[in-house]
Amino acid sequence: MQTSPKSPQSSKAHPAGRWLYPRPEGLFCEPGGFYVDPNKPVDKAVITHGHADHARRGHGAVLATPETIAIMKLRYGEDCAGVFQHIDYGQTVSVNGVNIRIVPAGHILGSAQVVLEHNATRVVVSGDYKRVFDPTCEPFELVPCDVFVTEATFALPVFRHEPAVKEARRLIESVRQQPERTHMLGVYGLGKCQRMIALLRQAGFEETIHLHGALVELTQFYEQRGFTMGSWRPIGKDSSGQRQDYAGQLVMCPPSAISDRWSRRFPDPATAFASGWMRVRGRARQYGVELPLIVSDHADWPELIATIKETGAEEVWVTHGREDALVHQLGLMGIPARALALVGFDDEGE
């Protein structure tokens, strides 16, 4: 395992910072000898979920939910880690005197918060999370704690997500009002794609959905685990093998495909993108999006603030996003907070 000096701790810092602290590889639990979501290969890793900015290949040993392990193997290969140990929601394992419990994070299928207990102190490492209902994953479970480690992807007051089913209905209405056009919906492959399909079905859309090839394998993975996706078809496939006319059809693809050569097969497409970033008009223009759908798998500003307050945490550690803004706001609220400044995270799931 790679080593580096312990980060200096302020005399005012929470005692948990003496045994859990950031290193260049990620958040390190010293007595347990493991990292949570390390950004490079380490001996022992606890992984919160399967997105590539949290789940890396090459670790000696991985502890994660069965779904996250299956996702890692699907994306990286069966031998992407030396040893896998699965842990179910609500289960506790002990590693060198540190109790590790896993509870749902509500982010994507298999996503988890890591509850660490050591020296009469409880730390919750939330990973990525959201509080709203998602038909494709277990709902977020609030755990009271002494220290709460929170993401900050959308930690600015401007970010207030719309009800997801409302955004799905907006897309359906656009498809029905413009039957001469193909609607191209940009979605990330793991979590967002399958959630949007489920939301569209919930909103009454029963037509066949056409999927870019990059979305097929993970959608099949969700179906294998009991999620009903309804009628869908890989793009370009039909019974006769002929090129199809997609007028009036809904096509889902990775966001990058909206503006690349692949999209030219669709004459006059209506472009949409499902993301929390669509709250920012400049982002929508950047992607050339005609119909921005504000659907996120991360907590928005009100959810972040409410969750932190509800945990009752004595101190909050902030990572992955708008760290300074959230730290400042928590200071105004009288909640001690600090930015961990961990590296290696992006918004793959957004």
Image: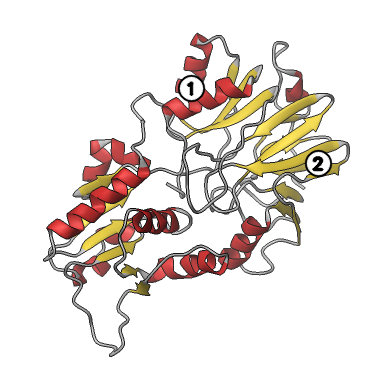
What is the C-alpha distance between the residues marked 1 and 2? 29 Å
**Residue 272 image point, x, y percent:** 25, 53
Task: Give the label, 1 or 2, closer to the camera.
Answer: 1
Circle 2: is it few (<14), some (14-19), or many (20+) Cα within 10 Å? some
Q: How is the image coloured?
A: secondary structure
Query: Looking at the image, can residue 208 be seen?
Result: yes
Q: Is residue 57 above or below residue 14?
A: below
- Amino acid, disc 1: Leu
Labels 1 and 2: the sequence-earlier one = 2
Q: Is residue 13 left or right of residue 219?
A: right
Judged from the image, the secondary structure of the residue bearing numbered disc 1 is helix
**Residue 158 horizontal/vertical position (percent):** 33, 27
* Residue 323 is at least partly visible in this image: no
Regarding mark 2 in the picture, which secondary structure is present there? loop
**Residue 6 vertical position relative to residue 44 in the rendered view, above or below:** above
Residue 260, quarter of the rendered image: bottom left
Q: Which amino acid does the dot numbered 2 rest on? A: Gly
Q: Which residue is mark 2?
A: 33
Which label belongs to residue 326? 1
Where residue 121 appears, x then y in whole percent?
78, 24
**Of the pair 177 and 99, the residue shown nearer to us:** 177
Residue 339 shown left or right of residue 277 in the figure = right
